[in-house]
Image (spheres, rainbow, N blue to C red):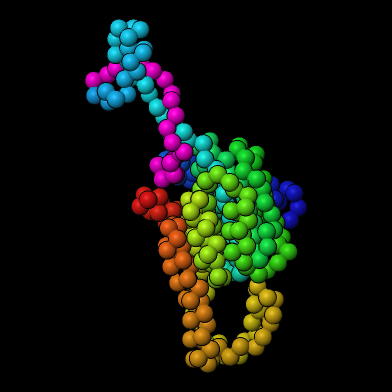
Amino acid sequence: MDTKDLLKKVRKIEIKTRRLSDHIFSGEYHTSFKGRGMTFSEVRQYQYGDDIRAIDWNVTARYNEAHVKVFEEERELTMMLMVDISGSESFGSKNQFKKDIVTEIAATMAFSATQNNDKIGLILFSDEIELYIPPKKGRSHVLRIIRELIEFEPKSNKTDLAQALKFLSGTQKKKAIVFVISDFMTQEYEQTLKIASKKHDITGIRVYDIREEKMPNLGMVPMLDAETGAVQLVDTGSKSVRLNYEKHYYDRVNYFKETFSKSGAGVVNTRVDESYVTKLLGYFKSR
């Protein structure tokens, strides 16, 4: 993709996702994810209904009039976006690839964090850490993240979420809000998720396509495994082949739901042809 096309695409995603985050998500995001605690803001005159425990007795004595301390939420947080860029993310059947929706969701979350003056970092992963952008604030930083989401080419097509979670725990020493965006067609990350969830507020956002759920009966078909690159002839007319495919698929989906729920992490499932806006808003409101 040349620079002109890339900038056009970045701008298009910015306009769409910024509007969403400005009008819909920033308030919900702020409410759902609390700051680190309360910090002193100012002293003002006591008003009817104020908590008497907040009275500042030194200032009250000085002015001979009741004054209270006002505290506000210490807001600044760090959001980490962990995005799966393995081969299976390039799947799509409804005029949209999973990768496109993943990029939009990540951009929307990033702009929501920016609205709240939070830092945003990015981890792009396959079965290795493909790219790490340390958390920073600001629009130009978010635009850099969107550029990487659009044009970054992974070295590997495989997925290893356990490795990515280990990297997260190693680099983020303070509590962060973490969104893992993937199709979660991987397993064996229960232990690392449990460890990461003790420190961070983690949500798994599963993006999937309806055509992945069932294998259609099309007879003998050459199929490419997006993660291994292997092509093999598959007899989709065989009922047992179709059932095995379905079992393999749902084993991973159920593993994701159970593992995330057990470790206290949030779960969002959104299909490429559904509104991820509705799904995310519902999730924020339920927290």
User: Where is residue 141 drawn, in percent x and y?
Assistant: 64, 41
- Residue 176: give x, y in percent of width and height: 53, 46
Quadrant of the image occupied by residue 136: top right
Identify which residue is drawn at 52% across, 46% down. 175
Region rendered in magenta: 28-48
Residue at (66% x, 66% y) in the render: 127
Q: Position of residue 231 (x, y in %)?
A: 69, 82
Q: Is residue 30 magenta?
A: yes
Instruction: Farthest residue to the right: give it.
Output: 2
> Residue 78 vs residue 224: left or right?
left
Q: Residue at x 51, y 48 (%)?
A: 177
Residue furthest top as drawn:
63
From the top left corner, tell me how far across and down residue 149 is, in percent: 64, 54
Asked if the stretch drawn in magenta spans residue 216, the answer is no
Residue 66 lies in quadrant? top left
Give the position of the N terminus as an image quadrant: bottom right
Viewer-proximal residue, 201 or 4? 201
Res 117 seen here: yes
Residue at 70% x, 76% y is 229
Callout count: 0
Q: Is residue 245 above or below residue 33?
A: below
Residue 276 horizontal side relative to residue 146, left or right: left
Q: Nearer the viewer, residue 254 or 188?
A: 188
